[in-house]
Amino acid sequence: MQSLVVRLRTVEQERDAWRSRCAGLAGERDSERETAQRLRGSGSYRLGRGLVTLARDPLRLVRRIRRDQVVPRRRTVKRPLPARLYVAIGLDLDRLRDFVQTVRRRVLVEPDHRAVVLTDNAGFSLLRGSGLILEYLADRETWERHRPDQPWDVVLSERLSRLYAEHDATHVSFVDPERPPTLPELLDTTPPGRTSLQQS
């Protein structure tokens, strides 16, 4: 009977700890969302984006200005945003949380795609409220311990192909577990196709 009481108290303590952690993550989410909204609304950000666009493609900025001046009267069908697949394999929970927050800021600042994050960290469920699509694949050691008949590299390749097709992705980016990308690196536009965020 005493062991049951101790177990019950332990479960209650774990429950309270989870609630506290979730509340902290929700507050952090709201704070980051407000920060991103203020950043996107600032004149310096718009000026900086305009200068970058002008330096890269002057005609694109002119076309954008002309397009903004013309108010279309016909109804347009809103198409879903393309998806980008981020392969975050080998990140511990803290780095995974930081990376997910960075991707979330990236999408809030410039919502030009849907973010799909594939991770092998079993604690990914703690980040479900991030607003991103999180996919899980067991890490290499766990997979090889339970399914030695199927090579983990083959399983990873098949999973990536399936996710790429399911989400109609246009990019696949591999994250360096030792140095996840920063927000400026994610905001740097890259040509369409399969890209990598790994550092050589």
Image (cartoon, rainbow, N blue to C red):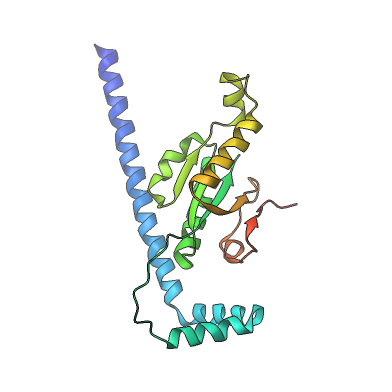
183 vs 4, nearest the viewer: 183
Residue 169, image x, y percentages: 54, 52
- Residue 91 in view, yes or no: no
Q: Is residue 75 above or below residue 15?
A: below
Residue drawn at x 56%, y 49% as measured from the top left: 86
The outermost residue toward the right is 200
- Residue 179 in view, yes or no: yes
46 vs 116, nearest the viewer: 116
Residue drawn at x 49%, y 67% as measured from the top left: 110
Q: Quadrant of the N terminus?
A: top left
Residue 15, image x, y percentages: 30, 34
Residue drawn at x 47%, y 82% as measured from the top left: 43
Residue drawn at x 61%, y 30% as measured from the top left: 140
**128 relative to 52 in the view: left or right:** left
Q: Is residue 49 above or below residue 164?
A: below
Q: Is residue 102 above or below residue 42?
A: above
Residue 41, image x, y percentages: 42, 76
